[in-house]
Image: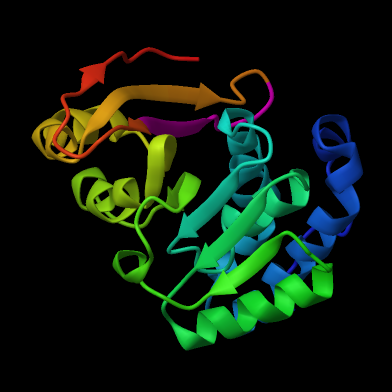
Amino acid sequence: MNDVSRETPPLVDKLFPRAAVPLSAYADLLATEGTLRGLIGPREVPRLWDRHLLNCAVVERLIPEESSVADVGTGAGLPGIVLAIVRPDLQVDLVEPLLRRTTFLQEAVDALELENATVVRARAEDLPPASYDVVTSRAVAPLAKLARWCLPLCVEGGLMLAMKGASAEEELDASERELMKLGAELCHIHQLGGDELANPTTVVSIVAGRAAGGSRHARHGR
């Protein structure tokens, strides 16, 4: 059996004390059913907390209160389920086209009793435009392609939050023309959890404007 720590890391109790119990339950689901169904690689199980759960949880710092959120290509629920757990004020749609994944997601939502999370079996491009305050994604596609899927889903002034790695700045530079066409108004690269996590989370945030607007880039760490 895959080994994931049955003890919640002290950092979870420190950062998200009210969410520690459901986060631990979700970690167990990922380590067991998630692995059996091929949604989480066996090698990822020992590092579920630091590489996946906490990495996703700190993204909540960028999301305004009472936001409607679409997590595009949510897969096993990262970051969508984590955000729904740590932020009960959010309404999170877990957007995923593959049946085997949505089946797992629905079972997880039911098991965790997440009343603020809804599983939506769909592709991003099939969803109604301008229907969410925030659209999140993690390791789904290059930024330019991702923006074509996600920015149209944001209300004007809403946020697209793309979890990225070391290539964030390079991707942002390469996608500038596409972002301008899509009406992006402000782009920013955030480093989250730098004082708490072994590997800080890099997030590209893009403010949605009206399609065909210009883009103003302000990029520096947070």
Q: Would you say residue 199 sits in the magenta stretch?
A: yes
> Which residue is more in the foreground, 165 or 121?
121
The reply, left or right, for residue 153 in relation to residue 90 is: left
Q: Would you say residue 73 sits in the magenta stretch?
A: no
| Coordinates of residue 202 in the picture (x, y in percent) | 45, 32
**Residue 198 seen in render:** yes
Q: Which residues are magenta?
A: 196-206
Picture quadrant of residue 54: top right
Vertical arrangement, residue 117 with respect to residue 9, above or below: below
> Which residue is more in the foreground, 12 or 16?
16
State how the image is colored.
rainbow
**Residue 47 seen in render:** no
| Coordinates of residue 28 in the picture (x, y in percent) | 78, 68
Residue positioned 44% across, 51% down in the render = 138
Q: Quadrant of the N terminus?
A: bottom right
Residue sitting farthest toward the left: 177
| Coordinates of residue 121 in the picture (x, y in percent) | 48, 78
